[in-house]
Image (spheres, rainbow, N blue to C red):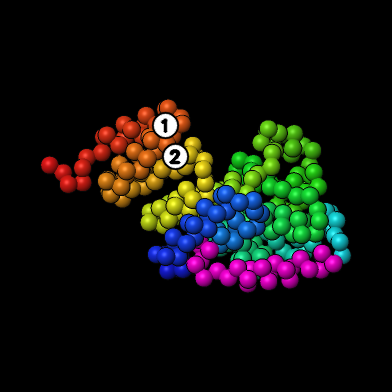
Amino acid sequence: MPDSSFPQGDAHIELCQRFTLLAGAPTSAYEVSVAVAQAIDADASVTGIEADFDQLIEPWQRRQIVASELLAEMGAAGFSGPRQGVVGVAHSHIGQVIARREGIPITLAIVLIEAARRCGLQCHGINYPGHFLVSLEQTVVDPLSMQPLGAEDIARMDVRALVPAGEQSIGLRMLNNLKALSAAVRDWSRLLDLLDYQVALTGTDEALASTLHFERAEVWEQLGVLDLAREAYVECARTCPHPDLAQRAQVRAGELPSEGGT
């Protein structure tokens, strides 16, 4: 997708406001994922995505599908990881994932979670490090394969990490994936926009927002915009409840020379 499709100007500000609303109101991972789709493509149609999703799950809803059948149907529909083996922004766009039937674990999981929810099944995400998982009717599922994990697989995992993922953490993780793609091509301006969305999505969580302010400062420093880097470090130091990070930010702010120079 071309850079020109990213939200700019007023569209960027409006999307930040939407993420702020999502942070403060009960919602679904699917709704957060639609906002992330609009962070990828400002022209992404909410009604179009919803229509495609309704068309996908309508036969399953009509049959009152059970968990094992839902997984089989998702597999039969062709949902899988990137078929060319290369991850791109489209794999984080829920509308594209529904249309093309390929995504990364977290977006495939969101399709499964929302389909299950609308079919009356118990389902939630698991923010497992390195590979997003799903709990479907109390069975741990790998969304890449749409198959339950075996007992041996689970035995090798850190069971302390097999806890439900909240909508906020899912959205932040999706945006992290997009940030990694932007960093890989050194698109620092795009990375700053994504950080804006993450800060908005943290809501009142100052501890989490302060780490994002530190990251933002590092990006501004990378770009050589030292006054804005200093401002972000100062904001991190001001709001961070963790003394070590607050001190690091304060030191970094003090070390930056003035852009005017002498």
Tag 2, which secondary structure? helix
Check residue 210 in the rendering and tell me which mark sits there, or answer none: 2
Q: Is residue 82 visible?
A: no
Check residue 220 in the rendering and tell me which mark sits there, or answer none: none
Residue at 84%, 54% (x, y): give it.
Answer: 68
Residue at 68%, 47% (x, y): give it.
Answer: 125
Q: Is residue 10 magenta?
A: no
Looking at the magenta stretch, what is its main secondary structure? helix
Residue 6 drawn at (x, y percent): 46, 65
Label 1 crowd (10 A; few <14 / some 14-19 / many >=20): some
Q: Residue furthest left?
A: 262
Q: Is residue 213 visible?
A: yes
Q: Residue furthest top?
A: 243
Is residue 92 or residue 150 the one in the foreground?
92
Label 2 crowd (10 A; few <14 / some 14-19 / many >=20): many
Is residue 257 or residue 149 the one in the foreground?
257
Residue 130 occupies quadrant: top right
Residue 231 drawn at (x, y percent): 32, 43
Relative to 257, does residue 224 appear above or below in the rendering? below
Residue 56 left/right relative to 3: right
Q: Which residue is mark 1?
A: 245
How many marks do you count on the picture? 2
Is residue 14 or residue 140 the one in the foreground?
14
Residue at 75%, 34% (x, y): give it.
Answer: 155
Tag 1: amino acid: Leu
Q: Is residue 46 magenta?
A: yes
Could you tell me if the residues under marks 1 and 2 are in contact, i.e. CB atoms within 8 Å? yes
Magenta span of residues: 38-62
Residue 148 drawn at (x, y percent): 78, 47
Badge nearest the viewer, 1 or 2? 2
